[in-house]
Image (tube, rainbow, N blue to C red):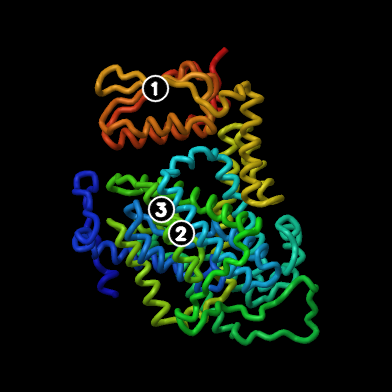
Amino acid sequence: MLKMLQYKIETMNPLTSPIPKTGFAGLTENWRNDIVSGFLVFLIALPLCLGVAIASGFPAMSGVITAIIGGLLVSRINGTHVTVTGPAAGLIVVILTAVQSLGQGDALAGYRLTLAAIVVSGVLQFGLGVFKAGRLSAFFPSTVIHGMLAAIGIIIMAKQIPLMAGVQALTGGVLPGIAKIPHDLVYFIPQIALIGLASLAILIFWPRIKTPSLQKIPAPILVIIGGTVFGQLFDVAHLQFGQDFILPKDLVLGPTFLVHIPDSLQASIVFPDFSKILSFAFWESVFAITLVGSLETLLVAAAVDKLDPYKRYSDLNRDLRAVGIGNTVSGLLGGLPMIVEILRSSTNVNSGAKTSWSSFFHGAFMLLFVLLFPYVIDKIPLASLAALLVYAGYRLASPRTFAERMILGWAQLAIFVITIAGVLVTNILAGVLIGIVAKLLIHLLRGVSPKNMLQISYHVERKDTDTWLFRVSGSAVFSNFISLKAEVSEVPDGKTVIFDLSEVYLIDHTVMELIDRFRQDYIERGGVCEIAGLDQQVPFSEHVLAARRRRV
């Protein structure tokens, strides 16, 4: 293995090098690059899979099961080239809510009922892929999606910060839980808090080290190694408290501060319980898992395409079908739902992966590790995993995300904040709906007619065999742009595409973003794409992709 890690990935210019083959031919041609990338991704994925599972109210091994299925199965049938599929922080809140609402206080029952919801969600995702619903992701405004993810980040931090200190609240909703964090932290356990803070410090400061050799070591694996060393020094497994240590009734310490897994992988397999399939709470969980999982998968897969040095493009509908199959199998065997995950996928690209076999190898390494070294996992402190998730939550809801919305204009910031508040006060589905309604109301206030809200007016002119002109009139907003987006996607590569927006009354940020993304992608594929008529529009902010209204 050391020789394999020392293998120097061959340097080449992807733009002049042949595109890597797929299938077994790709394995034969690129196995050295892909196995190295797969191992490095595995090092990052292992702690994150454990942390996501525990934070979701699932057994730790359920996250590992998901990663194994994502690697060994989904990588063989998906529509992407260098993405990595597995459990992710974005679904923690959805799964934890499902466990609590379906189980009604019984953690094991909630776990098995949620597995059933994951199975049904996987079937729905497969159906969405069959009916080519990948394009429907455009219907959800980007600001609302970012607001949803920021709210999820806030909830993750609120749930995990007390665990970094060794305490856990038993009751309370999201907002009361956030308000209680200072009170809960008063009862911190010094040894556990030190492990948590040291882990967080590694995540913050390690990426800032500029030494190339050290940068190759993933920060998450250092967190696990450091936390395990501290755990052994403090003998966390046998940590005891004096009888005079009095806690509030809504707090618990322990009873264990280490990860616990069954003695074998077979013992980790749990089957779903479909007894509540006719209940409203069950289908609410199904739709929440499907919505969040599908949106994240589509958005991340499209983002990873931009990182691919060979400029290959994913078949998003095929990928949705593959993730649906993966989620169905994962739910049947006791695992979490999976999505295309950005951190692991970007690490895969940066490590020199060339084909989807790198994701397969990451799953294979995961399987070998839990079969050969399960006793290592039992020594990982929960505080270290909590720190990983706090850091992930912060990245979703950092001040930078608020600043980015502010640059786009006050309306985008308002929608962003309203969506966050909606998710925190209600739930993810209701919060997203509240954000969409807020955006529609802003469009109405800006003069968009109700009829134009769902129907876009445009016509296509073919000046010659190589030029496609799309003349758009009325208003182009997130809720009516799907039909035009579908027609534009049918234009063959290598042509000239012109968007004439001179007669548009209002064009929102989501549509500006979609047109600009298409323009960049189409140019990269060898075509020409121009946007005409923007000189007739007045932007609502200085951002190049801000919403615009026609000059009066």
Mark 1 or mark 3: which is in front?
A: 3
Res 487 label: none
Which amino acid does the dot numbered 3 rest on? Arg
Q: Position of residue 540 (x, y in %)?
A: 58, 26
Above or below — where is 266 with respect to 336? below
From this viewpoint, is residue 394 visible? yes
* Disc marking residue 470: 1
Give the amino acid at mark 1: Phe
The reply to whether dot 2 and dot 1 touch (C-beta < 8 Å) is no
Q: Which mark is residue 321?
A: 3
Residue 449 x %, y %: 61, 22
| Residue 34 as seen in the image, left or right of residue 550 | left
Looking at the rendering, in which quadrant would you find the N terminus?
bottom left
Mark 1 → mark 3, Cα distance in angstroms:
31 Å
The relative height of residue 162 versus residue 174 in the rendered view (above or below) is below
Q: Which residue is mark 2?
A: 207
Q: Where is residue 509? Give x, y as percent.
A: 53, 32
Q: CA distance from mark 2 to mark 1?
A: 45 Å
Relative to 164, is 128 on the left or the right?
left
